[in-house]
Amino acid sequence: MPEKKYIYAFEEGNARMKFLLGGKGSNLCEMTRLGFPVPPGFVISTDACREYTRSHSLSDSLDGQVEEYLNALEKKLGKRLGDPDDPLLVSVRSGAAFSMPGMMDTVLNLGLNDQSVQGLIKQTGDERFAYDAYRRFIAMYSDIVLEVDRGKFEGALRRLKEEKGVKQDTELTAADLKELVKTFKAIVKKETGKDFPENPQDQLREAITAVFESWNNPRAVVYRKEYKIPDDLGTAVNIQTMVFGNKGFDSATGVAFTRDPSTGEKRIFGEYLTNAQGEDVVAGVRTPQPLNRLKEEMPQVYEQLMKVLDKLERHYKEMQDVEFTIERNKLYMLQTRTGKRTAAAALKIAVDLVKEGLITKKEALTRIDPGQLDQLLHPRIDPEAEVKVLARGLPASPGAATGEVVFDADIAEERGMAGKKVILVRWETTPDDIHGMIAAQGVLTAHGGMTSHAAVVARGMGKPCVCGCEAVRIDLDNKLLRVNETLVREGDIITVDGGAGRVILGEAPLIPPTVSPDFQQILEWADKHRRLGVWANADNPEDAKKAREFGAEGVGLCRTEHMFFGEERLPLVQSMILVDSKAERERILEKLLPMQRGDFEGIFKIMTGLPVIIRLLDPPLHEFLPNLADLRVEVTEMRLKGAPQEEIAEKERLLHKVRAEVEANPMLGLRGCRVGIVYPEIYEMQVRAIMDAACNVKAEGFDPKVEIMIPLVAHANELSLTSERAKAVAEEVLQAWGMDFSYRVGTMIELPRACLTADELAKYADFFSFGTNDLTQTTYGFSRDDAEAKFLAKYLESKILVNNPFEVLDESGVGKLVDMACQLARKTKPDIKLGICGEHGGEPRSIAFCDRVGLTYVSCSPYRVPLARLAAAQARIGVGEDLTK
């Protein structure tokens, strides 16, 4: 059996091999194939990483192939790794199939030791450069491989600069850096008990191992969870010849985007640093220069870079994010990948690429992440408001957010999980801050540029971010930040305006977003390709209005219980529940009827000509009543304080009635259609209010499309009885108004038995609406609140479940029930309308499932309607269509 191939030279691969060679490796191969100036090297495949993850050791086969490909690289370049006369130095970099910026590990300048550094001096004639590269290698290798805290090396560097009276690393002399190397080695000896490793082959083997290990470091795991990247893909390892941007001021390193990643504008966007290595740009060690300055400093290199960027974008037909190094006026390309961008930029780039003839409309639709559209549907700072601008920085990621200042990622996560809105403030973020950035509403850094870690990650997440706010002085010991004479302590409120780069003291007023022309264009294209209808959940006229603005084609769920919690209504509802006789209950319901009617009229008017599904009362009645424990405390306090006896007696009567309504398991108790069966007068009042409202707006010239939904049905006899009663009341109202228009009566499918007997239920239903929140609870036997509070996180961490089933529809369980119910229902009634109205109706993967099983529509919150329109189109495009047409 032939030996498995784990390694590919850059000349052997191509861009189509990203799942084997990772995104970085496959693109390095592709750029090499296209003839771009790429330093030579080879890629260790993700297969090797997966094998390492299983065995926790590098196989003999892999060791042999590394030696073989390293020998070939040495022969090609006429250098040997770590040679004392003319050393080959390499970088060892991670690279997964999906871009995970900064989440895994990289080692630069590998192959340096006390002998090879002399060879580097000999070949370059530059002692300062050689020791600069050596001190960087020791710090990075020790951090990544030996697990020595990088802060110890940064502290030593800072102390040396203070001692020498300089501010920048570039001001240190060769002698200073040589001294620093000795200091760094002493740190390694003290922290590990061993000397820094000198053998280049050992350095390489341990670096490869460390990169494989970094696939499962905490920040990478958190990032994959946030972006739904599978844990079993593994990372490739890229071994590449080093080129140096720190050889002097005719050398540089930088990052460039072929379009603006914040706005999508067609202009080259990027930054660079002269006399630096790539880590300096992303780590914010020095504030970089905008890329257009390179045109003045190195005009020929700049023109070459512009041509390369144009060719790359045309080749990939997508906005590219590249890393480059200039070594003594010679350009080298170190990476290209599809650039992360804001939602606004994604829309503009997709539309512009269609206009430029590079991609089709269908391809444009696949370029937009539906989840990203959320960014565009959130507030921004009111331009008319008077605000106190505390400081200004770089507008790294657009949008605005308000929250409490926190200086630590762990605290940001803790407070975020507690429901608090926080702004994470850091000198500069690192990949280890990822969990805090996820939890925060926005990010503020005192250092770093537009391509720093904070900027890139925040843009990808759609969170507002202000970077490089150098007026901010952070005091971590006392947990405060200072801008001139103003102090802001942890817990104080600030607002970050990522679009303008402003930091505002206090809570700034925000205004709703607007839909841009690019956004509208993408949605128009999406509407031409989707089959699923997209409706909205709307409980009031305001929600219905917003839903229409975002293109909803109906209301898939109007929850009548939310209308009962108003200040004027709740006392009536409580009285209605607690009275002993039907006559008293009907008297109170008569007072509630006009209130309900008014609610429905507003929604019918806004949604004129479009269907409105109104769900009759669903929750347990106890939810409307005073809390039992609070009542007990209140009665006890009244007794202790000597309240009048008649007041105590009245409160005790209330306590007795509330106690009588208590159920052992209220979510499976007297709720849904059971309320309508036990207290038919409640449902009758609601149906009367619905039909009265419809007749009234019909008389005013509107076109109401009434659909009445009976919740929590388990048995066909329940639906037969309640639907018959609902129709009787509806006909009575129509007759009283002298009108005759069609309406529908259907049911909400949220119990497993309802799915299993859907053919029987369909006899009495004009439509089914799957309430997948409750259907998930009853299928799993989970109480959602308890599961998410007590054990669901552990289930996800232990990979018992891949996704939270309340966020992403469980296709193999809950989905199987939905599919079965659809098939059974259509056997009885082929034209029955089928929809979904749980939270899953606004989740892209769940929408794709709904399309596959043939639902008629999905219904979601108004703000997720645009997302659902796009996801529904992508679901169709993904089913056997040629994207190039």
Image (cartoon, rainbow, N blue to C red):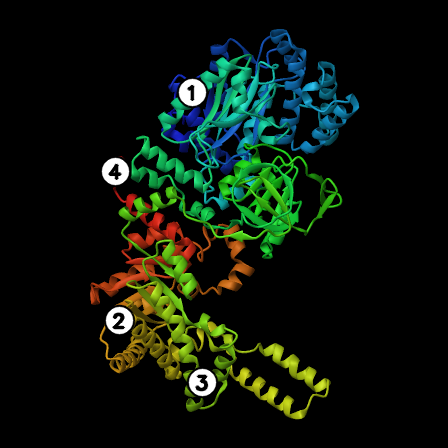
In the picture, the quarter occupied by the N terminus is top left
Mark 2 element type: strand
Res 409 visible:
yes
Q: Is residue 569 above or below residue 587?
A: above
Q: Tell me, yes or no, whether the two marked residues, 4 and 3, touch with CB atoms within 8 Å.
A: no
Find numbered disc 1 in the image and state the secondary structure of the residue it sits on.
helix
* Label 4 Cα crowd, 10 Å radius (few <14 / some 14-19 / many 20+): few
Q: Which numbered dot is residue 743?
A: 2
Tag 1 near tag 3, CB within 8 Å: no
Q: Position of residue 471 (x, y in %)?
A: 68, 36
> Disc 1 marks which amino acid?
Val
Q: CA distance from mark 4 to mark 3?
A: 61 Å
Decide which of tag 4 and tag 1 comes sooner along the chain: 1
What element does badge 4 sit on? loop
Q: Which residue is mark 1?
A: 308
Residue highlighted by disc 4: 882
Placement of the C terminus among the 4 image quadrants:
top left
- Considering only vertical position in the picture, is 323 above or below 364? above
| Amino acid on which disc 3 is placed | Ile
How far apart are the two marked residues, 1 and 3, measured between alpha carbons? 76 Å
